[in-house]
Image: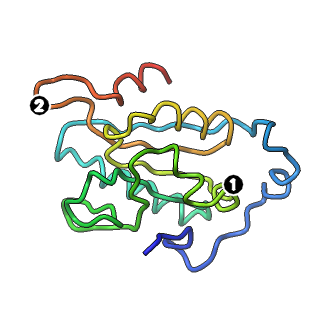
């Protein structure tokens, strides 16, 4: 089952900037977006914070989508689930570069906010976030571990230093 943009609400809210966005060409960058990073050790509440932020954005009329690594199969593949059992539907992906195509270019253009859970699993995290925020004007909320049990840093740490 494919998650949809209307997963958190019954319809896609009207976006006052949609008319402006439709006048822009694919080659012209939109207004800059934002990248928010939620980082910490296991059981620190990163996913809970991510889902709370996504619900808040959705309740304020912004179009949202959630992504997680397809390597995370703990509670099922098509949902992001907190340790408390709260869950929202998501797109399980092997890499972030495939998201726009799988979601659909027109649907992607209507997105305002993209949440990414277990971000440390995505090798193309920096490239995706940079393009989505800087070129496409999206707000990206990234949650993940900064390192493994041996204290070796994941890509997420290098992404933070590059942002």
| Residue at point 33%, 54% (across, down) | 70
Distance between the alpha carbons at the discs numbered 2 and 1:
38 Å
Residue 76: quarter of image = bottom left
Left/right placement of residue 151 relative to residue 107 reads left
In this view, 100 is above or below 103: above
In this view, 140 is above or below 79: above
Q: Where is residue 82 in the image (x, y as percent from the top left)?
A: 25, 60
Identify residue for label 2. Answer: 149
Left/right placement of residue 72 relative to residue 8 reads left
Q: Residues within 10 Å of mark 1 (few under 14, many from 20)?
A: some
Residue 148: quarter of image = top left
Of 54 and 154, the residue lying toward us? 154
Identify residue for label 1. Answer: 109
Q: Position of residue 138 (x, y in %)?
A: 61, 45
Question: Residue lying farthest top?
Answer: 161
Question: Residue lying farthest left?
Answer: 150
Q: Position of residue 71 (x, y in %)?
A: 27, 51
| Residue at point 64%, 71% (across, down) | 12
| Residue at point 49%, 73% (across, down) | 7
Of 148 and 93, the residue lying toward us? 93
Of 93 and 61, the residue lying toward us? 93
Left/right placement of residue 35 relative to residue 119 reads right
Secondary structure of the residue carrying tag 2 is loop
Q: Where is residue 55 in the image (x, y as percent from the top left)?
A: 45, 62
């Amino acid at each position: 089952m494919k998650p949809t943009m209307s997963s958190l609400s019954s319809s896609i809210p009207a976006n006052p900037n949609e008319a402006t966005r439709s006048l822009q060409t694919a080659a012209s960058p939109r207004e800059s977006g934002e990248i928010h990073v939620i980082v910490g050790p296991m059981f620190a509440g990163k996913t809970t914070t991510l889902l709370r932020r996504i619900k808040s954005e959705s309740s304020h009329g912004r179009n949202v989508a959630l992504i997680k690594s397809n390597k995370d199969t703990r509670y099922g593949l098509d949902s992001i689930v907190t340790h408390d059992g709260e869950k929202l539907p998501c797109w399980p992906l092997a890499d972030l570069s495939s998201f726009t195509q799988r979601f659909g270019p027109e649907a992607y253009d209507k997105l305002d906010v993209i949440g990414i859970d277990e971000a440390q699993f995505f090798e193309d995290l920096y490239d995706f976030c940079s393009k989505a925020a800087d070129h496409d004007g999206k707000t990206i909320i990234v949650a993940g571990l900064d390192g493994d049990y041996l204290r070796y840093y994941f890509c997420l740490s290098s992404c933070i230093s590059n942002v």
